[in-house]
C-alpha cells in the first residue's frame, strides 16, 4: 500500500475572527496546523503529505511550519481554491503516481489520534472508501427557509461525519472530476464519492476530534491536550 495524505489548510478562518488564518494560531505553544501534520509525520504507513494553502501563505507555511518542525514527509505545498472542495481537488491531483490510497484530513482538526489513523488505514484496504464519524447527540431537524421544522430524521440513522476520510486513489479522483464536471458542491469528500454509487463505510471517530472553527473550540482543544 502506498498512502498519500492531503491536508486542506487554505480556508479563511472567518468564523474564528482572528487576525490571521486560524491554522497558524497557537495551541499549547504550537500552531494548530503543526499539531495536525505531526500526527501524519509520525505514522509509519504514510509516504507523503501534501499541504494545500492560500497562495499568499505558502512561503509562511514552508518556513514557519514545514521547515521549523522538520516535517520531511511534506513533499508539496499546493495553492488552494475558493472552496474546500477546490482546495482538496488541487491537492489530490498532485498525489504521487505510485500512490494507491489518499487520506484527506482538515488542517483544522489537530486532535485526531494515532488510533483513528491506524483504524482508517486498516479499513480502507477492505472497503476502498471510509470516513470517520460519531453518533449525533442532539435531535436534528430539517427546517424550511422560514425556519419552520419540516421533518425530524430518526436519530439512530444520523452520524456527524469528520475527517480523516480515506479512499482508493482512482475512486477519489473520479469523484472529484465528476463533481466539478456536474457543478456539484459537497461539504465533504465522501458526499462526492457517494454520487458515484460507491458505498462509503463509516468507522468510529471521536468527540474530541474537533474541527477548530470558533474561539471556544480553541479553549476546548487546550483542555483536551492538557488532559492527554
Ligand atoms: N477554500 C478553502 C476552505 C477551507 N479549507 C480548509 O478546509 C478545512 C475545513 O474548513 P473550515 O474549518 O470551514 O475552515 P475555514 O474555511 O477556514 O473556516 P471559515 O468557514 O470559518 O472561514 C480547514 O482546514 C480549511 O483550511 C481549504 O483548504 N480551502
Ligand atoms: C469535511 C468536514 O470536516 C466533515 O465534517 C466538514 O464538512 C467541513 O466543513 P467546513 O464548513 O468546510 O468546515
Image: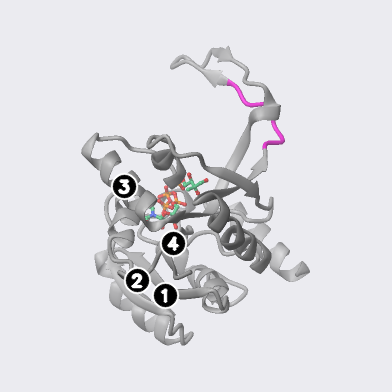
Residue 14: x, y in percent? Answer: 41, 50
Q: Residue at x 46, y 61 (%)?
A: 22
Say which label, 3 or 4, has the lower sequence index.
Answer: 4
Badge 2: how crowded within 10 Å, few (<14), some, or many (20+)?
A: few
Residue 53: x, y in percent? Answer: 33, 65
Say which label, 3 or 2, has the lower sequence index.
Answer: 2
CB of mark 3 near ligand 2 (< 8 Å): no
Q: Are marks 2 and 4 in contact (CB under 8 Å)?
A: no
Residue 225 falls in which quadrant of the image?
A: bottom right
The kind of secondary structure element at disc 4 is strand
| Residue of label 2 | 98
Q: Give the left or right position of residue 78, taking residue 204 as reference.
A: left
Say which label, 4 or 1, has the lower sequence index.
Answer: 1
Q: Give the left or right position of residue 109, taking residue 97 as reference.
A: right
Please state, as top left, top right, bottom left or bottom right, where the C terminus lies in the image.
bottom right
Task: Residue at the far left: name it.
Answer: 181
| Residue of label 1 | 48
Q: Magenta region: which residues?
A: 136-141
Residue 174 is tagged as 3
The kind of secondary structure element at disc 2 is loop
Residue 89: x, y in percent? Answer: 31, 54
| Residue of label 4 | 101
The kind of secondary structure element at disc 1 is strand
Above or below 54: residue 156:
above
Amino acid at each position: 500500500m502506498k498512502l498519500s495524505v492531503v491536508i486542506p489548510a487554505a480556508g479563511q478562518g472567518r468564523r474564528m475572527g482572528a487576525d490571521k488564518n486560524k491554522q497558524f494560531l497557537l495551541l499549547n505553544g504550537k500552531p494548530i496546523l503543526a499539531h495536525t501534520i505531526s500526527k501524519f509525520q509520525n505514522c509509519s504507513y504514510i509516504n507523503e503529505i501534501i499541504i494545500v494553502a492560500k497562495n499568499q501563505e505558502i512561503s509562511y507555511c514552508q518556513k514557519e511550519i514545514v521547515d521549523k518542525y522538520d516535517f520531511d514527509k511534506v513533499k508539496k505545498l499546493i495553492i488552494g481554491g475558493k472552496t474546500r472542495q477546490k482546495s482538496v481537488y488541487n491537492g489530490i491531483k498532485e498525489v504521487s503516481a505510485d500512490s494507491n490510497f489518499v487520506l484527506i484530513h482538515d488542517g483544522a482538526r489537530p486532535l485526531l489520534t494515532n488510533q483513528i489513523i491506524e483504524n482508517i488505514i486498516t479499513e480502507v484496504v477492505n472497503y476502498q472508501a471510509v470516513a470517520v464519524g460519531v453518533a449525533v447527540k442532539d435531535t436534528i431537524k430539517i427546517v424550511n427557509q422560514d425556519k419552520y421544522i419540516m421533518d425530524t430524521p430518526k436519530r439512530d440513522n444520523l452520524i456527524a461525519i469528520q475527517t480523516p476520510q480515506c479512499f482508493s486513489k482512482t475512486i477519489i479522483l473520479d469523484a472529484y472530476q465528476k463533481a466539478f464536471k456536474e457543478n456539484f458542491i459537497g461539504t465533504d469528500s465522501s458526499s462526492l464519492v457517494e454520487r458515484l454509487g460507491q458505498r462509503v463505510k463509516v468507522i468510529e471517530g471521536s468527540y474530541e476530534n474537533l474541527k477548530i472553527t470558533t474561539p471556544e473550540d480553541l479553549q476546548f482543544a487546550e483542555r483536551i491536550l492538557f488532559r492527554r
